[in-house]
Image (cartoon, grey):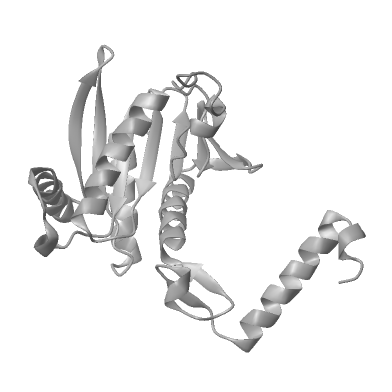
Amino acid sequence: RRLEPYAPQWFREALELRDLMRALEEQPVAAAARSEDVKMRAVLLGWKLYELLTFCLVASALLEDGYEEESSQGEVGLKKGERSITLIHGAPLKGSAIRGTVPPDIVTPESLRGRPDLSLEGNEVRAVMDAKFSIKSSYATLGRFKVMAYMYEYDADYGVLVIPGIDRRELYDDEEEATYKLYEQAKEDGYVGIVIEGSGRERRLYVLVLDPLEDHLILMNRVNKLLGEMGLV
């Protein structure tokens, strides 16, 4: 530890990994919605795991369809013949519609850019996805409009709200009632779409149901069908 302030980056990272491994040996890892839910040194946040589950399902579906990985420097590049797709996890995209603030220079335009949980950029298709690990109708409804904002900001062809489910008992207003009706249909079919007309073309926002407690093959089938509808597989 005395060497740490002067040590190279790889050495400091090695120390952090050593501490993590010792923590894992001493106590079990806990999966929780919030870090304060459990008093342990090693906590995996439920919402972050849900984001990673969504990312892995999409990547697996593309790889099983015949895509091959080309690069993974912060982004995962996949290629299949003449078709290419880049998967971007939790980062802004190029081509944001945000130009600045009024008054100017309050913050940089870059700091205001949206960060979709997962984005897919293909030859002719751009899709943005947001995964909400909650069964609250209010949270899902906010997520629906958040995905629409991402679609507008990045001129995306498709938007996808990923949820595990919705509790019928907590509906507050007409917006949440509408979200619940979308969920009911998506629960039956795996996903459901909202048609959005704008900028001279039709776009679609999907609600995709991915319940981590369901069988893996069911989840993969839903993701495959949705990617097929978007023309990616």
Q: Name the image quarter holding residue 158.
A: top left
* Residue at the image point whose x is 34% and y is 59% from the top: 133
The front one of 221 and 109 is 109
Name which residue lies at 24% across and 61% down: 135
Count the labels in the image. 0
Above/below status of 179 relative to 164: above
Along the horizontal axis of the image, is 170 left or right of 19?
left
Residue 202, percent from left and from top:
23, 21
Viewer can see residue 204: yes
Q: In the rendered image, which quarter contains the C terminus?
A: top left
- Of residue 176 and residue 131, the one placed in the foreground of this image is 176
Q: Quadrant of residue 28?
A: bottom right
Q: Is residue 121 left or right of residue 169?
A: right
- Left or right: 228 with respect to 116? left
Q: Position of residue 182 (x, y in %)?
A: 14, 46
**Residue 222 at x, y percent in the picture:** 28, 51
Q: Could you tell me which residue is drawn at 92 percent across and 66 percent down?
A: 3
Above-or-below relation of 26 to 195: below
